[in-house]
């Protein structure tokens, strides 16, 4: 049996229902990956600059670029694309599953087996 | 760059490119209405992505980003990260939900969600303010390009650029051309990346992927000319970097013309996957833009020009300067000029038309002439288009920053006003009309405070920098919205039910 949660107010911090809970869970995971990468890479570059007085940042080169250039200028946009793909794949799978679930729910009473 | 001389070949390329867009628009005008989702067909997710990218690509991306990189080095990475990372916020927190609301403009959304005509009118006014500020950045780009093409000074170039833009909109409108956004994106990306490949090839770097190849120029600048790239936070603080980056992200998720892309896409899945393609197409430009700034520095160093020389005007034209200093043929420089002009023109025309439509449908019949007929609204839209163009032209005569900085101010306004209104409107059902009106007004005050009181109270500039105020501002606006909403009556049960059933689908198994 299913019921609509019509008497309670859902929010990002208090999601209600299977679909919303699942959606909010994946949004939290994606946003954590997004925030950690942005803040983490800048702190990494900042700490290297402060601790080693630029020496290490001169030597660390990746794909022909200084490490901080590569991480912020090349990798982060790529990481954002990856996060968006992961989110979409999850949403597509979730949509298919919920559609299948709702179809089963509709078909059963029509066959008369549950009644 | 040569001023005082008419650049005939680049001018011919600019004219040819606009002729191509108009002809293609005429040919595809019928098909294009379908692509916007009002008909029964569309061009697929790649097409939606190209539309998002073409809509996004402005003078700030094409000219401004390289200029900021040239002047401020690593600090410009905040623009790259901010302008791409904002799409993650947009996708996961808003795109799907906005589509479920089924409203076609930002004022429509705000008016429906908050059940308030006042909130709707305020959202329309804010959309117009954002459009005006964003257009000033584009006008600066247009004026610099027109000045270079015709060999004239900045101020007459602003006036000529405005006349050309208005003429372009009138001609396109009269002929009934629709913008072929896919074609426009692919022309833009070719005009941006082809000259860069030629430059890196000429230097003997890895030219097939110049986005990586320019690393050799950084090494050369460092080893042979002592140009220091290894202190990313030497001239700026970590707070300034994060403030700018997050402001641009909040602004990306709150810019009306970016959000409008999701109202018009036929399906939710297409809207979501369109964002991924759009982000990829946008990233192609942002992976490449820093290279122009670095290569320009290298050419200048080789020519004995001191590294601390560089005005804002020169920096905003650095993409063309790099190609010119690198000895590329004039047609390659012309390609860049044509691409930059096209990016600025299409963005400006779109924003001015959106702004005038917002006035004629959301403000004119509500505040000025309540019984206005449809034809009155159309005349109002046409008239307001010219008024907006004149306002932007006047503001562009004395711009307050570089192209990217002016655009960032528009992002700050959107991040302080529209972004909190949408975020709480979608994810917190208790948010009400009084809350959103107070919140958006607070956001406007925060955005403009540094412009008017920054010189009197320097600490305001530190907490709310003009281009980066939404980092502290957006959370503050949300706090105001929450406090005021909790202190006043909750929204109607109708909107609560709509959010639960239609937006969040909170079906619960028991």
Image: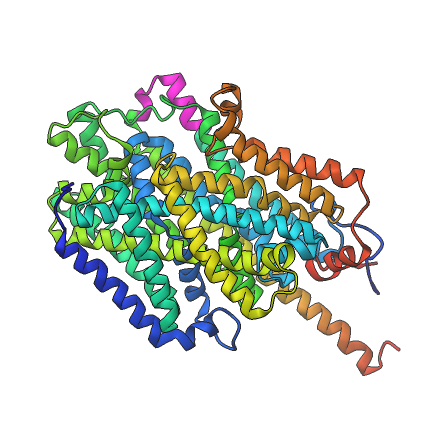
Task: Tell me what residue is drawn at x 53 percent, y 23 percent.
Answer: B460
Image-based side of B288 in relation to B446, left or right = left
Image-based side of B507 in relation to B475, left or right = right
Q: Is residue B259 magenta?
A: no
- Residue B368 visible? The answer is yes
Task: Tell me what residue is drawn at x 74 percent, y 47 percent.
Answer: B432
Secondary structure mainly formed by the magenta segment: helix
Q: Quadrant of the N terminus of chain A?
A: bottom right
Q: Return the x and y of residue B508 as percentages of the image width and height.
A: 79, 58
Q: Return the x and y of residue B366 as percentages of the image width and height.
A: 64, 57
Q: Return the x and y of residue B233 as percentages of the image width and height.
A: 38, 24
- Position of residue B126 relative to residue A56, above or below, is below
Task: Tell me what residue is drawn at x 52 percent, y 70 percent.
Answer: B37
Toward which corner of the image does residue A95 lie, by quadrant?
A: bottom right
Q: Does the magenta stretch include residue A54?
A: yes
Query: Range of the magenta residues?
Result: A43-57
Question: Which of the pair B161/B347 is nearer the observer?
Answer: B161
Q: In which quarter of the image is the C terminus of chain A?
A: bottom right
Q: Return the x and y of residue B62 as percentages of the image width and height.
A: 32, 48
- Position of residue B108 relative to residue B484, above or below, is below
Toward which corner of the image does residue A51 lie, by quadrant?
A: top left
């Amino acid at each position: 049996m299913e019921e609509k949660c019509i008497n309670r107010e859902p929010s990002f911090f208090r999601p209600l229902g299977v679909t919303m809970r699942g959606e909010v869970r994946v949004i939290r995971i994606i946003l954590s990956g997004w925030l950690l990468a942005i803040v983490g890479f800048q702190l990494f570059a900042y700490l290297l600059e402060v601790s080693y007085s630029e020496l290490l940042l001169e030597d660390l080169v990746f794909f022909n670029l200084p490490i901080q250039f590569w991480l912020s200028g090349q990798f982060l946009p790529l990481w954002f694309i990856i996060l968006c793909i992961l989110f979409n794949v999850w949403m597509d799978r979730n949509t298919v599953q919920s559609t299948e679930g709702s179809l089963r729910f509709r078909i059963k009473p029509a066959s008369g087996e549950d009644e | 760059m040569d001023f005082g001389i008419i650049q005939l070949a680049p001018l011919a390329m600019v004219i040819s490119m606009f002729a191509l867009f108009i002809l293609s628009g005429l040919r595809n005008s019928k098909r294009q209405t379908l692509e916007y989702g009002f008909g029964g067909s569309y061009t697929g997710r790649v097409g939606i992505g190209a539309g998002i990218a073409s809509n996004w690509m402005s003078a700030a991306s094409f000219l401004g980003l390289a200029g900021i990189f040239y002047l401020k080095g690593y600090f410009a990475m905040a623009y790259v990260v901010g302008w791409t990372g904002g799409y993650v916020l947009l996708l996961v927190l808003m795109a799907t939900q906005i589509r479920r609301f089924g409203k076609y403009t930002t004022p429509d959304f705000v008016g429906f969600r908050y059940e308030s005509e006042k909130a709707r009118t305020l959202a329309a006014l804010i959309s117009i303010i954002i459009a005006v500020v964003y257009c000033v950045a584009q006008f600066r780009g247009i004026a610099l390009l027109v000045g270079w093409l015709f060999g004239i000074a900045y101020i007459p170039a602003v006036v000529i650029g405005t006349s050309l833009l208005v003429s372009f909109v009138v001609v396109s409108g009269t002929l009934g051309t629709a913008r072929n956004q896919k074609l426009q994106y692919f022309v833009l990306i070719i005009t941006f990346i082809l000259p860069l490949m030629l430059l890196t090839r000429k230097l003997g770097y890895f030219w097939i992927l110049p986005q990586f190849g320019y690393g050799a120029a950084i090494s050369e600048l460092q080893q042979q000319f002592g140009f220091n790239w290894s202190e990313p936070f030497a001239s700026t603080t970590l707070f300034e970097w994060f403030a700018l980056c997050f402001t641009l992200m909040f602004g990306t998720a709150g810019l009306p013309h970016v959000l409008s892309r999701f109202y018009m896409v036929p399906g939710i899945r297409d809207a979501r996957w369109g964002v991924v393609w759009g982000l990829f197409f946008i990233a192609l430009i942002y992976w490449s833009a820093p290279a122009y700034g670095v290569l320009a520095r290298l050419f200048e160093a080789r020519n004995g020009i001191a590294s601390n020389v560089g005005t804002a005007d020169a920096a905003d034209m650095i993409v063309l300067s790099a190609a010119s200093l690198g000895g590329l043929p004039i047609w390659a420089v012309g390609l860049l000029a044509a691409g930059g002009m096209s990016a600025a023109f299409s963005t400006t025309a779109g924003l001015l038309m959106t702004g005038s439509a917002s006035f004629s449908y959301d403000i004119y019949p509500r505040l000025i002439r309540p019984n206005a007929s449809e034809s009155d609204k159309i005349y109002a839209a046409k008239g307001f288009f010219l008024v907006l163009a004149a306002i932007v032209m006047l503001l562009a005569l004395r711009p307050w920053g570089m192209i990217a900085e002016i655009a960032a101010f528009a992002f700050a306004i959107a991040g302080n006003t529209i972004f909190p209104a949408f975020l709480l409107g979608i994810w917190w059902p208790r948010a009400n009309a009084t809350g959103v009106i107070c919140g958006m007004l607070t956001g406007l005050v925060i955005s403009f405070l540094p412009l008017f009181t920054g010189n009197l109270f320097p600490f305001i500039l530190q907490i709310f920098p003009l281009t980066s105020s939404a980092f502290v501002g957006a959370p503050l606006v949300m706090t105001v919205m929450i406090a005021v909403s909790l202190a006043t009556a909750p929204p109607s049960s109708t909107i609560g039910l709509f959010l639960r059933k239609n937006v969040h689908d909170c079906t619960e198994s028991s």
